[in-house]
Amino acid sequence: MDDACTSTISLKGVSKGFTVGDYHFDVLKDVDFFVSEGETIAIVGASGIGKSTLLHIIGTLDKPDSGSLVYNGKNVFDFSDEKLALFRNEKIGFVFQFHHLLPEFTALENVAMPMLINGFQKDRAAAESEDILKRVGLGKRLLSRAGELSGGEQQRVAIARAIVRKPSILLADEPTGNLDRKNSERVHELLDQLNRELNMTTLVVTHNMALAAYMKRKVTLFEGKIITSYHEGVSELS
């Protein structure tokens, strides 16, 4: 099967570098990468190798120096800034290592905030936020302030906030990096469950091999290139 034809996400010839003083270094080098609808992918590799840079480009938070990012046949970096922001808000959910919750607001208010910012009615935002929080196992913590929640609960609130608008793509950068083993396992199971229930394409940057094992495909970034390793043992270099 031709991945380029069936993928919902396609990076073609993507390169990205950074300049610090007189020194320039390339993080991504002519990367081709295809992601099919509903896939779960772990992006792994050494610290500082460019995993987060790759995720930020896929999430349209950063632009490559060259190459294209195609979603369902459209190069999104050809969009205007306004259209690109609208695309990002509607189609992509983000979860980061640090949850970035507002500690003085309740779990329900934190999750509802993206919907309210985007013009949804308060009643609808509250109802959908409550439903998502129940889905991630926090139905009894709706009115607890974020600052009163445990680390694992806070990260589940962050995941609920990322998926409340039911994006087609979930991008997570070290989502269990600050969690203990028990709470990490809960997040692993939750991401797997959400993928199965919602068919949500999921890409996770992680150093946690237990989390990577939950994903259907593992992608290793090495010297600016991608080594794609399928759990069945198939691998290819792009």
Image (cartoon, grey):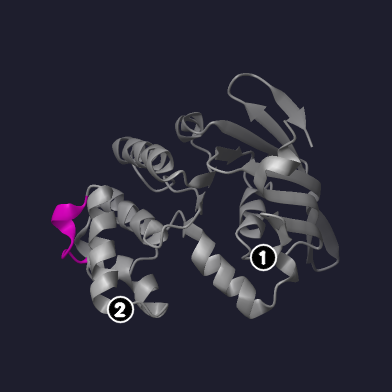
Can residue 77 be seen here? The reply is: yes
Query: The C terminus appears in which quarter of the rendering?
Result: top right
Tell me residue 100's x, y (percent). 39, 65
Crowdedness near tag 1: few (<14), some (14–19) or many (≥20) residues, C-alpha within 10 Å: some
Residue designated by label 2: 121
| In the image: residue 126, left or right of residue 216 | left
Please check the rendered image and state whether residue 141 is part of the magenta-colored stretch, yes or no.
yes
Q: CA distance from mark 2 to mark 1?
A: 31 Å
CB atoms of marks 2 and 1 within 8 Å: no
- Which disc, if any, is residue 78? none
* 31 up-or-down from 100: above or below: above
Report the residue at 72% width, 30% height from top. Answer: 1
* 142 up-or-down from 82: above or below: above
Q: Please tell me in which quadrant of the rendered image residue 19 appears.
A: bottom right
**Magenta segment, which residues?**
138-145
Front tag of 2 and 1: 2
Q: How many marks do you count on the picture?
A: 2
By secondary structure, the bulk of the magenta-drawn segment is best described as loop
Report the residue at 34% width, 66% height from top. Answer: 101
Residue designated by label 1: 62
Tell me residue 120's x, y (percent). 35, 77
Tell me residue 212's x, y (percent). 51, 33
Of helix, strand and loop, which one carries label 1? loop
| In the image: residue 31, left or right of residue 36 | right
| In the image: residue 55, left or right of residue 104 | right
Of helix, strand and loop, which one carries label 2? loop
Q: Amino acid at mark 1?
A: Asp
* 129 up-or-down from 116: above or below: above
Tell me residue 108's x, y (percent). 24, 66
Crowdedness near tag 2: few (<14), some (14–19) or many (≥20) residues, C-alpha within 10 Å: few
Report the residue at 57% width, 44% height from top. Answer: 37
Q: Amino acid at mark 2?
A: Gln
